[in-house]
Image (tube, helix red, strand yellow):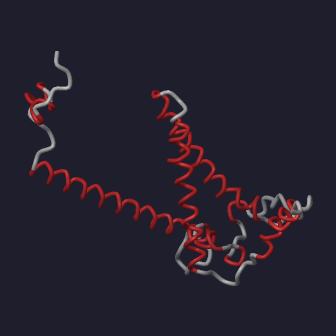
């Protein structure tokens, strides 16, 4: 049995490094690519906000959990705002360097549909009004989003209130004060946890 050549791990690493060169951008937008990018963005947010927050909350004392949750949320908000202000420009702005895009596109100056890819066309371009019909602007897009959030909040609040009232009318949400004083194990199940 011949051992594998010593250069095979290096060849594999080189192949993996050059593999992304095979994935070329398509002309135009594709609905499948757009939906996958949006799904990936949502998964990253789920990983960052609840996942990372709950992970770090498990490492601190109980009284500090809310503080850790709010710190993770605040960091996610700050990073999102920094991306909108200068991050896009640093990543994709025109520059001689491959690592620094410069600040030429800070605040999305000169960002058009041609300079945007799949997610930025809908995320960035949708909010800033790039490629939108006349009369649409960043304010109108944000107003549409705020209206949607408010409508969903009102809808879920109203349905929650109806469900709570329905459950309260059919079986009640609370027990009598005497039953609560005596203990629900005894009054509801006729059981005792400890015989004292």
Q: Quadrant of residue 146?
A: bottom left
53 relative to 24, above or below: above
Residue at 87 percent across and 61 percent down: it is 4
Residue 29 left/right relative to 191: right
Q: Quadrant of the C terminus?
A: top left
- Image coordinates of residue 193 in percent, x first then y, are 20, 26
Q: How many marks?
A: 0
The residue nearer to you, when weighing 6 against 32, is: 6
The reply to whether residue 16 is visible in this rendering is: yes
- Image coordinates of residue 139 in percent, x first then y, are 52, 65
Q: Quadrant of residue 23?
A: bottom right
Residue 146 left/right relative to 98: left
Residue 127 left/right relative to 21: left
Q: Quadrant of residue 129?
A: bottom right
Residue at 55 percent across and 32 percent down: it is 59
190 relative to 159, above or below: above
Q: Quadrant of the N terminus?
A: bottom right
5 relative to 188, above or below: below
- Image coordinates of residue 134 in percent, x first then y, are 55, 80
Residue at 83 percent across and 58 percent down: it is 99
- Image coordinates of residue 167 in percent, x first then y, are 15, 51
The residue nearer to you, when weighing 21 against 152, is: 21
Which residue is most to the bottom? Answer: 27
Residue 9 left/right relative to 54: right
Residue at 54 percent across and 41 percent down: it is 55
């Amino acid at each position: 049995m011949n051992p594998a050549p010593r250069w095979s791990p290096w060849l594999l690493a080189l192949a993996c490094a050059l593999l992304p060169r095979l994935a070329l951008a398509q002309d135009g937008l594709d609905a499948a690519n757009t939906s996958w990018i949006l799904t990936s963005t949502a998964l990253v947010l789920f990983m960052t906000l609840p996942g990372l927050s709950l992970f770090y909350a498990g490492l601190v004392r109980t009284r500090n959990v809310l503080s850790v949750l709010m710190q993770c949320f605040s960091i996610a908000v700050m990073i999102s705002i920094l991306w909108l202000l200068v991050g896009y420009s640093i990543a994709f702005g025109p520059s001689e360097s491959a690592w620094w895009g410069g600040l030429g596109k800070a605040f999305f100056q000169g960002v058009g549909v041609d300079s945007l890819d799949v997610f930025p066309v809908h995320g960035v371009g949708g909010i800033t009004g790039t490629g939108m019909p006349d009369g649409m602007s960043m304010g109108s897009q944000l107003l549409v989003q705020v209206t949607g959030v408010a409508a969903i909040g009102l809808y879920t609040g109203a349905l929650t209130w109806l469900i709570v009232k329905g459950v309260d009318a059919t079986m009640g949400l609370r027990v009598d004060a005497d039953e609560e004083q005596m203990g629900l194990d005894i009054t509801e199940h006729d059981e005792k946890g400890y015989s004292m």
